[in-house]
Image (cartoon, rainbow, N blue to C red):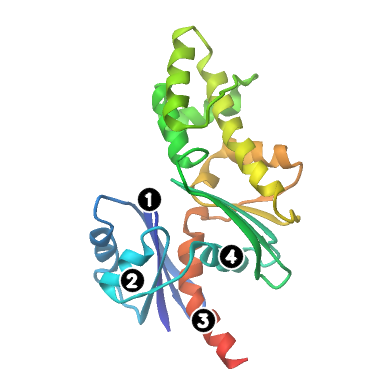
Amino acid sequence: MRVIGLDIGSRTVKRVTVDGGEVIEHRVVPNQHNPLTVCDDLLSGQRFDRVVATGYGRHLFAEHRQAENLTEIRAVALGVRHVHPAARTLLDIGGQDTKVVSLDSLGSVVKFEMNDRCAAGTGRFLEVMATALSYPLADFVQAGRAARKSQSINSMCTVFAESEVISATARGADRAELARGLHDAVVRRAAAMLQRLPLEDQIVFCGGGALNACLRELIAEALGRKVQVPPEPQIVAALGAALSVNSKQNSSSD
């Protein structure tokens, strides 16, 4: 059976096609004001038997396209376990939310937390801060990695933090040290969420935030543990959505 998983996020939409449990192809595109149009374009010309949607736009897609949908937590858990079968703790930093998930030895969700009330501590937060510091995003990440010191940021509210950063640069603060401080702030928030879980080894970091090398290094340092990153961290939830059909079938046959 050929299944497409769609992860309809706030910043991007991810498509993963799975056939017989094997990934055939994947694609990541920017989201727009009309997610349905983006999804329709991603599905146009594709051959598939079923579609499963996840992400913040899953209900909209399921309602208007009569498709199945799956919670983000379940989708991320299934996707991560497919790539890292021994995974026990998951961190997913996306464009507008952060998720932490604890799994048992069989891959079932034990506990999870989500920060989805604002953009604080997410990819969008860092994008806004990079702009406030007049950095292209890639240069912002590299500046944070290279800085020898960290300039602390007091506010995690995107609006207030942006104002704080602009004021700090006006006073002559080092931009690279501010970039490091902003990454540190995101990591502290994520680490605090993780510490409220039954924190096990075999930690996997996924989502678009896992593409940020500065975040990857600082999270491992903050936790004092090895953190694994899938080869394509952005598509993990879409992969899990596609795999959920086979998972349900296997459960029904047990």
Above or below — where is 176 with respect to 73?
Answer: above
Tally of numbered tags = 4
Q: Residue at x 29, y 68 (%)?
A: 43
Q: Callout 1: helix, strand or loop? A: loop
In the image, which is nearer the foreground, mark 3 or mark 4? 4
Task: Give percent across and percent down for residue 212.
Answer: 53, 40
- Reading the image, the residue beneath label 2 is 62
Tags 1 and 2 touching, CB below 8 Å? no
Task: Give percent across and percent down for residue 87.
Answer: 68, 62
Q: Amino acid at mark 4?
A: Ala
Tags 4 and 2 touching, CB below 8 Å? no
Tags 1 and 4 touching, CB below 8 Å? no
- Reading the image, the residue beneath label 4 is 77
Q: CA distance from mark 3 to mark 1?
A: 27 Å
Name the image quarter holding the N terminus.
Answer: bottom left
Q: Callout 4: helix, strand or loop? A: helix
Q: Residue at x 63, y 91 (%)?
A: 254
In this view, the residue farthest toward the front is 117
- Reading the image, the residue beneath label 3 is 246
- Reading the image, the residue beneath label 1 is 10
Q: Residues within 10 Å of mark 2 (few under 14, many from 20)?
A: some
Q: Nearer the viewer, residue 169 or 118?
A: 118
Above or below — where is 88 with respect to 180?
Answer: below
Q: Amino acid at mark 2?
A: Ala
